[in-house]
Image: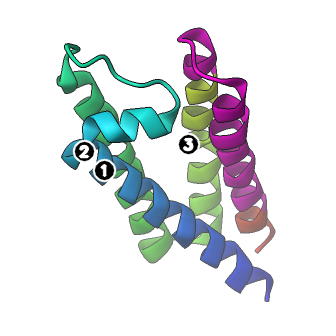
Amino acid sequence: MLATTAYGLAIVLGLFVTFIGARFLWAPRAAAADYGVPAKQDGDAAYLEVKGLRDLTFGVLGLTLIAFTDARTAGWYMLVVALAPLGDTLIVLRHGGTKAAAFGIHFATAVIVLVSAALLFAV
């Protein structure tokens, strides 16, 4: 049961971040608004696409590790990748986003990713 929960949560997180990355590539301004810091209409969309590529890569890499390595390796990956949503929390706060978005989306995501890491280590 623990292994099913650990791998299930890790897979859901991997698919979720892959989707977020893809969304930043196909609808960057809408994705930025949902991120918590809307993009300026005249801003450079390339930076939004960089975020999309980062998230897409994190998601695909995570899913690949889950598929082809052991739980411990996937756990280490989740532990390290939790830095991204923690950093996103600070970015949203520093650039005028709401505390609700910073903590309710990004910090909460970091906590869930850390829970996923702990579950994978426990398998």
Tell whether label 2 touches label 3 (CB within 8 Å).
no
Three-letter amino acid code of the residue under disc 2: Ala
Query: Which residue is identified by label 2?
Result: 27
Quadrant holding the C terminus: bottom right
Question: Where 44 sits versus 5, above or below?
Answer: above
Separation (CA) of disc 3 from disc 2? 24 Å
Q: Which mark is residue 68?
A: none
Disc 2 versus disc 1: distance between alpha carbons?
5 Å
Going from N to C along the chain, the mark reached first, 3 or 2, is 2
Q: Residue at x 27, y 37 (%)?
A: 28
Q: Which residues are magenta?
A: 90-118
Q: Which residue is mark 3?
A: 81
Which one is in front, 120 or 51? 51
Amino acid found under the numbered disc labelled 3: Val
In the image, taking residue 116 as reference, residue 64 lies left or right, namely: left
In the displayed structure, 2 sits above or below 18; it is below
Q: Whole-percent x and y of residue 7? A: 62, 76
Residue in the image at 58% along x and 20% along y: 97
Mark 2–mark 1 contact, CB under 8 Å? yes
Label 2, secondary structure: give it: loop
How far is mark 3 from mark 1, CA to CA? 19 Å
Q: Position of residue 64 (x, y in %)?
A: 39, 66
Frontmost residue, 61 versus 28: 28
Quarter occupied by residue 39: top left
Residue at screen point 35% across, 59% down: 60
Q: Amino acid at mark 1?
A: Arg
Q: Is residue 19 inside the magenta stretch?
A: no
Counting from the top left corner in percent of width and height, residue 14 is at 48, 62
| Foreground tag (3 vs 1) | 1
**Horizontal side, residue 123 vs residue 65: left or right:** right
Q: Kindly identify which residue carries mark 1.
A: 23
Disc 1 crowd, CA 10 A, few/some/many (<14, 14-19, 20+): many
